[in-house]
Image (cartoon, helix red, strand yellow):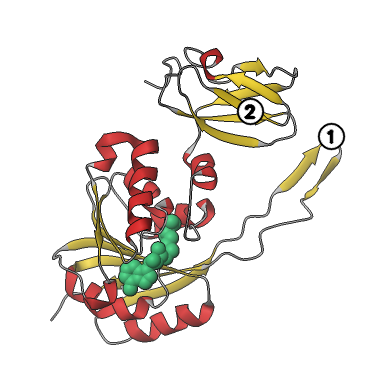
Amino acid sequence: MSRRALQAGEPVLLTDRKGRRYLITLVERQEFHTHAGSVAHDALIGGSEGMRVRTTRNAELTVWRPTLHDYVLKMPRGAQVVYPKDSAAMLMLADVFPGARLLESGVGSGALSLSLLRAGAVVVGYEIREDFALRAAENVNRFLGSEAADRYQVEIRDAYQGIDAEDLDRVVLDLPEPWQVVPHAAASLRPGGILVAYTPSIVQAAQLHEACDNGQWTMASTVEVLHRHWHIKENAIRPEHRMVGHTGFVTTARRLATQ
Ligand code: SAH
């Protein structure tokens, strides 16, 4: 599948020598324009990943199928997305597996949904904003196609009001007051189920711990994920000067059985 030629309708990533990245969808007879000239999509359609092309102004571009990481950072977004370093950790901490029955709220731009669906989960999303729900569905469909879209159902509703599901394996939260969802998650998760929540502020994480401290939950834990990139060139080997200092915290807890 992935070795087949690039086709019209596919998203592709173009990279230039300076590391700039452009995400486009291939359309027959269209042109891609940058300040460094243009390229006909037809020069890419039928080609292969890793192929180099030249713009009308002789700049070199390389074409790739975007990774999920590339796609999430370049796709259209309204709400702030969960960054790949955090969604990667959330997949492992929530132990997301193929066929897992999962509730996600809010859905936002669908960045986190993309990771959950890629890992094989069956996702019901609760999102209060219809425009975001539509954009998330489009983002999922464009990158993962109809097989994943069939496992993704977004409802326009307020997660603070309750969850209409039983026997969920996982509840995944990225909304301002996740503690308001904790009682609903307790009722909807099966024993042993996992709650995972992303919060930009540690005060939100602390409030979540407090909500889980009621005998229904155990193993509450919060982590932040820091990536420090390294500059490696000949003898100059050192950490990069800059790093992303803060995105958010990831809090997990596990549902006990009701005795
Ligand atoms: N995780 C998403 C971003 C979510 S941003 C991503 O990676 O793309 C937070 C979202 O929660 C927003 O879209 C907001 O509209 C939604 N939201 C806020 N309160 C909510 C509530 N009570 N119920 C459902 N969704 C809510």
> Which mark is drawn over residue 33?
2
Q: Are marks 2 and 1 in contact (CB under 8 Å)?
A: no
Q: Kindly identify the amino acid type of the residue bearing the numbered disc 2.
A: His
User: From the viewer's perspective, is 198 left or right of 256?
Assistant: right
Instruction: Please say whether residue 171 is visible from this viewpoint.
Output: yes
Q: Kindly identify the amino acid type of the residue bearing the numbered disc 1.
A: Glu
Residue 100 lies, in percent from the top left, at: 23, 52
**Residue at (77, 44) in percent of width and height:** 231
**Residue at (22, 42) in percent of width and height:** 150
**Residue at (59, 17) in percent of width and height:** 51
Residue 115, compared with residue 250, is above or below; it is above
Q: Secondary structure at mark 1?
A: loop
User: From the viewer's perspective, is 45 left or right of 256?
Assistant: right
Q: Earlier in the sequence, mark 2 or mark 1?
A: 2
Residue 118 lies, in percent from the top left, at: 35, 42
Residue 38, compared with residue 197, is above or below; it is above
Residue 117, compared with residue 194, is above or below; it is above
- As measured in the structure, the alpha-carbon distance from the residue carrying label 2 to the one carrying label 1 is 36 Å
Q: Secondary structure at mark 2?
A: strand
| Residue indicated by mark 1 | 234
